[in-house]
């Protein structure tokens, strides 16, 4: 048996063992538990949301056992780097700086940034109207970089979306700038009549499921996401949470 053939056979064996190990252990999946409608606890105290149900469907398709590890959003990437978690799903935008330290699945959701103001605020309509105003956004997210690039300097960084909404309602800031899904969901649900979304969609971006670099899960999960998009599974879930087709 040639050295080259033995080498190839060993690589295949190690790959099979590695994948088998992933399926045998209980995976730890990091999540920010306060990001409606992607992940949150409902009135019954049950953990649910678009991300939660998408990952559950992926795990069932791949035969994976897992448990959730809730943490602040800004702790997810470091946790993946240290390999204290096996994956993270929390509306994580795929961007170059993150791609340098973790691996991402095929994009599973396209979003962008919007502005949220009080319902009676007619002075803010575009991003340019935020100059000289107090603006809140979520800590360690792409919206921070966007605001700075637009010359917005009075930025209040908060750990979760509930804090953002409360800060706006109590008058601590003039506007909130963050990912479109949770802001639009809040404006139509708990914030109806109190707040409104204004302006266009800024900085289109895609969400991906993140993994430690070199994780064998990345390719398997990406294939499953593509399969779900082809067979209607994804569309059914999308309609459930957002009311329309993708």
Image: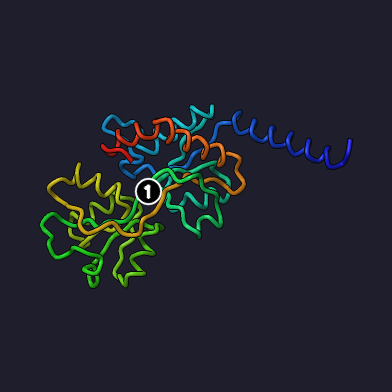
Q: Residue furthest left?
A: 120
The image shows residue 33 at horizontal and vertical percentages of 37, 42
Taking depth in this image into account, of 219 and 23 the one nearest to the observer is 219
Q: Is residue 69 left or right of residue 8?
A: left
Residue positioned 44% across, 35% down in the render: 55
Q: Quadrant of the C terminus?
A: top left
Q: Quadrant of the N terminus?
A: top right
The image shows residue 26 at horizontal and vertical percentages of 55, 31
The image shows residue 103 at horizontal and vertical percentages of 55, 49
Q: Which residue is mark 1?
A: 110
Q: Residue furthest right?
A: 1
Q: Name the quadrant containing residue 131.
A: bottom left
Taking depth in this image into account, of 46 and 240 the one nearest to the observer is 240
Taking depth in this image into account, of 77 and 2 the one nearest to the observer is 2
Circle 1 SS class = strand
The image shows residue 106 at horizontal and vertical percentages of 49, 44
Q: Is residue 59 left or right of residue 160?
A: right
Q: Is residue 147 left or right of residue 73?
A: left
Q: Residue furthest front?
A: 230
Residue positioned 64% across, 30% down in the render: 20
Residue positioned 36% across, 56% down in the render: 204
- At label 1, counting other C-alpha atoms closer than 10 Å, the crowd grade (few under 14, some 14-19, many 20 or more) is some
Q: Name the quadrant containing residue 3.
A: top right
Residue positioned 56% across, 55% down in the render: 101
């Amino acid at each position: 048996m040639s050295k080259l053939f033995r080498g190839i056979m060993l690589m295949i064996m190690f790959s099979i063992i590695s994948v088998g190990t992933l399926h045998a252990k209980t995976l730890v999946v990091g999540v920010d538990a306060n990001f409606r409608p992607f992940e949150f606890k409902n009135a019954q105290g049950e953990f649910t949301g678009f991300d939660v149900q998408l990952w559950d469907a992926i795990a069932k398709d791949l035969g994976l056992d897992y448990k959730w590890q809730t943490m602040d959003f800004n702790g997810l990437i470091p946790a993946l780097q240290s390999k204290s978690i096996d994956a993270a799903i929390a509306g994580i935008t795929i961007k170059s700086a993150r791609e340098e330290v973790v691996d991402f699945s095929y994009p599973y959701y396209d979003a962008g940034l919007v502005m949220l103001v009080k319902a009676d605020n007619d002075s803010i309509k575009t991003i340019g109207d935020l100059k000289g105003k107090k603006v809140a956004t979520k800590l360690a997210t792409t919206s921070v970089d966007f605001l700075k690039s637009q010359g917005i300097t009075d930025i209040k960084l908060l750990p979760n979306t509930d804090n953002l909404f409360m800060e706006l309602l109590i008058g601590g800031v003039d506007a909130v700038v963050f990912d479109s899904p949770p802001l639009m969901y809040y404006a139509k649900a708990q914030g109806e009549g109190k707040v409104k979304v204004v302006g266009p969609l800024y900085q289109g971006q895609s969400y991906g499921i993140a993994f430690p670099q070199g994780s064998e899960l990345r390719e398997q999960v990406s294939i499953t996401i593509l399969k779900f998009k082809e067979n209607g599974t994804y569309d059914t879930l999308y309609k459930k949470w957002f009311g329309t087709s993708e």
